[in-house]
Amino acid sequence: MKNRPSRSSPARPKPAAAPSRAADRIRESARELFYREGIRAIGVDEIVSRAGVTKPSLYRSFASKDELAAAYLEDYEAAFWERFDADAAMHPGDPRAQLLAYFTSLAQRATKTGYRGCGLTNAAVEYPEPGHPARKVAEAHKRALRERLVAMARQMGAFDPQTLGDGLLLLLEGAFASGQLFGKGGPARSLAAVAERLIDASVGSEG
């Protein structure tokens, strides 16, 4: 006679783990769809279908699509800083080399097929209203990035760190936009070279 499982044996898998797994799948699906198609273009039904969950599962994890969009952008921002800091880590104590390393890697990404620019910049364009959750995340990130670039310009000894930092930010935003328009062989391929010339022209003593 075959052994039968005890009635007191715990059921598997444990239900407590399901909500977090569902939330992870929702965030992953939302990131892929939002980045490729835009946030406004994607409905909740498409997200839950891609994630393989129910609509109630989504609303248990996120109060609204707007909150999911903000969560997507928070994930996107974390990935941005991870790439930025990884490139910087290759050149400790050398902000010029750190920036050029990031600009070089961005140029490579921005000239690949399917590149859709910066998700945070795209969200700011999609949501001009200041109070929108997605807009808030995008604005906070861009302010932090601007401050970081100005600080690095100051560390490089720029005679006008604010102007150099702003110039570098404008180059980045230009690469985000032009990469979507031109793709391979587009102006984003010159990003690091242009940044290098701007830095060299801005560092040193005046006059």
Image: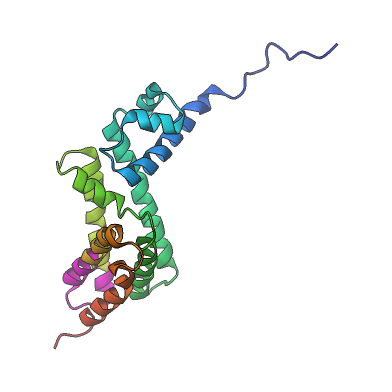
What residue is at 24 percent from the left and 72 percent from the top?
154
In the image, farthest residue toward the bottom: 207
Q: Is residue 43 above or below residue 93?
A: above
Tell me residue 158's x, y (percent): 22, 77
Task: Locate residue 73 relative to residue 165 in the image: left or right.
Answer: right
Q: Is residue 50 above or below residue 143?
A: above
User: Which quadrant of the structure image shows residue 25?
Assistant: top left
Tell me residue 123's x, y (percent): 24, 46
What residue is at 26 percent from the left and 61 percent from the top?
178
Task: Locate residue 144 relative to residue 79 in the image: left or right.
Answer: left
User: Which quadrant of the structure image shows residue 137?
Assistant: top left
What residue is at 21 percent from the left and 79 percent from the top?
202
The answer to which of 6 and 174 lies nearer the viewer is 174
Q: Quadrant of the N terminus?
A: top right
What residue is at 42 percent from the left and 72 percent from the top?
91
Tell me residue 143's x, y (percent): 22, 55
Q: Is residue 152 above or below residue 67?
A: below
Q: Quadrant of the C terminus?
A: bottom left
Q: Is residue 62 visible?
A: no
The overriding secondary structure of the stretch rendered in magenta is helix
In the image, farthest residue toward the right: 1
User: Which quadrant of the structure image shows residue 117?
Assistant: bottom left
Residue 14 lies in the magenta stretch: no
* First to last magenta residue range: 152-169
Q: How is the image coloured?
A: rainbow
Tell me residue 124's x, y (percent): 21, 47
